[in-house]
Amino acid sequence: MAASGAERLLVERALATLEEACRRIARGDEAIERVHQARVGTRRLRTMLRLFGSSLGKPARRRLKGLAGGLAEGLGGVRDRDVLLRHLGTLRPGGDPRAARALGFARNRVRMEREDALHPMRESVGRFLEEARPARRTAGRVAGGARTGLSGSIRLALRQLLGELLESEAGVLSHGDFEAAHRMRIAAKRLRYALETVREVLPAVRCRALDAGIELATRVQGRLGHVQDHQVWGLALRALSKEVRRSLEEPALTEGLGLLAAHERRRRDRELARFLERWRRHRAEEDGPLAVLAAWVSGDSQDGGSN
C-alpha cells in the first residue's frame, strides 16, 4: 500500500516538534523540563519513523533513524540523572545516619554524572539540528497539505502497536517479570505517542475510542513507569554500594546505600502489585477503554474516525 499524505504528515509533524525542542536546548535552555520535552520528541519521531518512515524514502529514513538514535542516547544521559536526582530529593532517611549519609553521597555522585553527560548531549543536539534539515525539507514537500481521516495503513499500524502491548502482558501477569513489564511500558508509550499524533495531525479523526486509547496507554505507561523507575534506581544504588565497598572501604556508607536499594525494591514490588490489580480490571471490562480501543483499531467499531 502506498504511503498516504496523512502518514507523511505524521512523520513531518513529529520531526518539526523535535527540532523546536532541540533548538531551545541549543540556545542554552538545559533545564529538566526542556530535556524531557526533547527526549519525548525523540521517542515520538522514532515511533513515527518505525510506522511510516518509508514515506520519506530509504535515504531520508535511514539518516533520520540514525540521528534520532544518537540524539536519544545524548538526551538520555542527562534525563536519566535528572529523574534520579528528583527522586533522591523525595527520599527521607528516617533518622538512620547511615541512610542519610548514603543519600547525600548518591546525590553528589549523580550531580557530577549529569555534568559529565551535558557535553555529549550538546554534541548530539547540534548534530541533529545540522543534519536533519534536508530530511525535514523532504518530509515537508511529500507531506503536502493532506489532512484526511484514518487510512487503512494507519489503522493497521495502530493495531500492531496494541498487539505489542497485549503480547507483553503474559509475563507480567503470570510471573511478575520486570523485563516483561518494561516491554509492556515501552509498548504503551509507543501506542500513546501514535494515538496522540493521529489526534493532533488528523482533525477528521475524532472518536471516543481514540481518546479512550490515549487515556489507557497513558495510565499503563505511568504505572509501569513507576515500577521501572524503582527497579532501575534500586539497581543503581546497589551497584554504587558495591563500588563503595571495593574502593572506599566504609562499611557505614555501604550499608546506607544498601538500605536505600532495599527501599527501592520494596516500592517496586508494591507498584507492580497495584498495576496488576488495575490491569486485570481493564481486561474484565466489556465496554472499558481496552475493549473499545481494540474494536476500533480492528475496524469492528462503528465509532467515528475513518475515511
Image: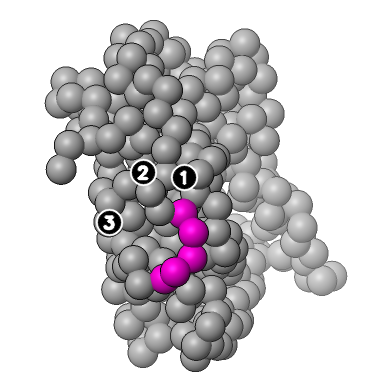
Q: Residues within 10 Å of mark 1 (few under 14, many from 20)?
A: many
Residue 198: give its label: 1
Q: Earlier in the sequence, mark 2 or mark 3?
A: 2
Q: Earlier in the sequence, mark 2 or mark 1?
A: 2
Q: Earlier in the sequence, mark 3 or mark 1?
A: 3
Q: Tell me whether the residue at label 3 lies in contact with that at label 1, contact meaning CB atoms closer than 8 angstroms.
A: no
What's the residue type where badge 2 is placed?
Thr
State the SS at label 3.
Answer: helix
* Residue 147 horizontal/vertical position (percent): 45, 33
- Is 90 left or right of 110, judged from the image as shown? right
| 79 in the magenta segment | no
* Residue 256 horizontal/vertical position (percent): 65, 65
State the SS at label 1.
Answer: helix
Q: Looking at the image, can residue 280 be seen?
A: no
Quickly name the residue at label 2: 47
Which range is magenta?
301-305
Q: Quadrant of residue 111?
A: top right
Which residue is found at the position 42% from the left and 71% from the top? 301
What's the residue type where badge 1 is placed?
Val
Quickly name the residue at label 3: 156
What's the residue type where badge 3 is placed?
Leu
Real-space Cα separation, disc 2 to disc 1, in angstroms: 12 Å
**Is the magenta region chiefly helix, strand or loop?**
loop
